Image (spheres, rainbow, N blue to C red):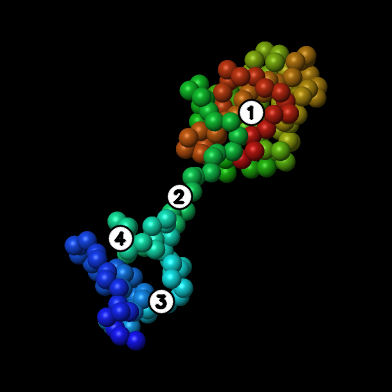
């Protein structure tokens, strides 16, 4: 076969080509034999395959077109999005909430007095809750005695959930809303009275 008949005229626009782009442009057809040796210098592997096939790292609609503006550019899948920090457990606190400390500062089965807010923060198997520290008889601050709340004035007794055990009282202790502060601490919002079964799971 005469080389002149087999050779095809390849016309490319004047452009600066790197070696990878050159190899993609000339590694097909009769000129490929001459181009392969230059393409294999410095240990670079030359990929072969059917005409029109793409190497696995080349993606995009113009990947196989040497005249495309994107020829020679390898695109990779978008990086995985940066994970967003997990949202705090429980409702987010509003402007009226008061920071009462980190969740880890409240041990299970204990009642912690927050005197500035007149509440006890209690942890049970369901989580945290806030119960009023004020006796419903004469508004004195209850103390903790043998796993119960005891009023110092007339000896009224309440369970940690605020229910009445005994004494000159007719109303249980109120429960207030707890929430999660932006710093991860527990907040108490005394503008919201909640059910005795409400817990903050932290």
Dots 2, 3 in contact, CB < 8 A: no
Provide the residue designation for mark 2.
82
Helix, strand or loop at mark 3? loop
Helix, strand or loop at mark 2? loop
Provide the residue designation for mark 3.
47
User: Few, some or many C-alpha atoms within 10 Å of disc 3 (few <14, some 14-19, many ≥20)?
Assistant: few
Lower sequence index among marks 4 and 1: 4
Q: Residue furthest bottom?
A: 1
Measured along the vertical axis of the image, is residue 99 above or below residue 87? above
Residue 50 located left or right of residue 15: right
Lower sequence index among marks 2 and 4: 4
Measure the C-alpha gap from mark 2 to mark 3. 34 Å
Helix, strand or loop at mark 4? loop
Quarter of the image with the N terminus is: bottom left
Q: Nearer the viewer, mark 4 or mark 1?
A: 4
Whole-percent x and y of residue 125? 72, 41
Q: Which mark is residue 57?
A: none
Provide the residue designation for mark 1.
130
Q: Which mark is residue 67?
A: 4
Measured along the vertical axis of the image, is residue 125 above or below residue 177? below
């Amino acid at each position: 076969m005469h080389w002149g008949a087999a050779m095809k005229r390849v016309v490319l626009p004047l452009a600066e080509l790197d070696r990878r782009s050159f190899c993609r442009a000339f590694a097909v057809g009769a000129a490929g034999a001459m181009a392969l040796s230059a393409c294999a210098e410095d240990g670079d592997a030359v990929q072969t395959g059917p005409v029109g096939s793409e190497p696995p790292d080349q993606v995009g609609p113009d990947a196989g077109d040497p005249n495309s503006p994107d020829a020679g550019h390898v695109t990779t899948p978008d990086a995985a999005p940066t994970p967003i920090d997990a949202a705090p457990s429980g409702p987010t606190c509003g402007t009226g909430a008061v920071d009462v400390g980190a969740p880890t500062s409240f041990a299970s089965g204990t009642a912690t007095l927050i005197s500035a807010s007149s509440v006890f923060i209690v942890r049970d198997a369901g989580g945290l809750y806030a119960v009023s520290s004020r006796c419903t008889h004469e508004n004195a601050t209850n103390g903790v005695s043998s796993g119960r709340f005891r009023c110092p004035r007339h000896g009224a007794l309440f369970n940690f959930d605020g229910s009445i055990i005994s004494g000159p009282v007719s109303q249980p202790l109120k429960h207030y809303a707890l929430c999660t502060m932006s710093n991860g601490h527990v907040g108490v919002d005394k503008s919201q009275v909640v059910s005795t079964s409400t817990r903050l799971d932290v």
